[in-house]
Image: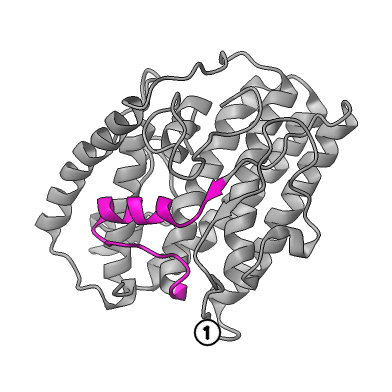
Amino acid sequence: MEHIEDMQQAEESSISSRRKALVMGGAALAGLALSRGARAQAAAATSDPAILNFALNLEFLEAQFYTYATTGASITASGGVITSGAGAAGGSVNIKANPMVPFTAGGPIQAFAMETAKEERNHVAFLQSALNASGANAAVQMPNIDLMTSFATLGGLIGVPNFDPFASEADFLFGAYIFEDVGVSAYLGAAPSIASSAYLSAALGIHAVEAYHAGIVRTLIFTGGATGQALSGTIAALRQSLSNPQTPGKTTSNFDTGVTTYAVAAVGGQTGSTVVDVDPSTAIVVGRTTTEVLNIVYGGSASTPGLFFPQGMNGTIK
């Protein structure tokens, strides 16, 4: 594929048209998922272990993405455990051969990737330990994960055919961008449902780390220039379209903002940025429900597995 850094900068009007088209594209993907047949989803009121296992599935996804990108191998090669615990047998990752990203040695993107890979593996181990302390094998096994077809599918909807986040460090950065803002909103959305103060403290601790990760990714995209900023807006629009928020007060425009600049007329025409992803009317991060998160990672329908989790997540919330 032609790498992202070689893409031509889009005009403002074409970006606007693409965003409108993405809403339809997301709906089409959701329709495709729904046509496979519905699966029952757990009720919103779930136990603390169910919520932490939902988070564990997402941490497996992120840990595998970053670890394959930095080492070319599964988290098991770094001591990660993926097959002990409850749930359907998994442990498979669909990924291209030799996925180690050709990072610029010693550069900021490589440094971020190496640090984040370690932290995501630690999140997996921490959640497994917390869950297993509450009961024998309470932590779920890793479900089957797709890190190849999933990205190619999304690439077709963002104007990057055959998108491969392992092809270059620029491509990797946008692969990370797809995940990180979702992780921040997922932990925030789940927090009010956690009853145990110990579990809540753990979840908020991980949420803070995910927010740091997202901020670094968004900053690196911002410093990369206008072309990458435009693509980030396209990805944000697709994420929000797939998320399909149903909560009163949420719309497809009041959260999940791409990285861009805007004029600040009050200070002589200087520009500000949207490096921090917040509701522009309140400057507060907006959380996602588990249904909204599943809508994204399944590719449009929380009731039908697909995209990153082709056979679905393990656990109660799936």
Residue 305 vs residue 239: left or right?
right
- Name the spot of residue 249 as percent of width and height, x first: 36, 22
Q: Choose between 93 and 269: the one closer to the eye.
A: 93
Query: Which quarter of the figure is the N terminus placed in?
Result: bottom left
Residue type at mark 1? Thr
At x 77%, y 55%, the residue is 80
Residue 158 colored magenta? yes
Residue lying at 50% horizontally and 16% vertically, measured from the top left: 40
For mark 1, give the secondary structure.
loop
Residue for badge 1: 104
Q: Is residue 221 magenta?
A: no
Q: Is residue 207 left or right of residue 241?
A: right
Q: Residue furthest bottom?
A: 105
Quarter-of-image position of residue 2: bottom left
> What is the quadrant of the C terminus in the image?
top right
In this view, 238 is above or below 318: below
Q: Where is residue 247 drawn, in percent x and y? A: 40, 20
Give the side of residue 262 with respect to residue 287, left or right. Answer: left
Q: How many marks?
A: 1
Residue 24 x/y as whole percent = 19, 37
Quarter where residue 158 is shown: bottom left
84 relative position to 59: left or right: right
Q: Which residues are magenta?
A: 145-169
> Vertical placement of 305 versus 221: above or below?
above
Look at the image and tell me whether residue 260 can be seen: no
Task: Please tell me which residue is depicted at 56% across the width and 13% down the height of the picture.
Answer: 43
**Pointer 1 local density, CA inside 10 Å: few below 14, some 14–19, many at least 20:** few
Can you give x and y, in whole percent of width and height, for residue 17 in the image? 12, 49
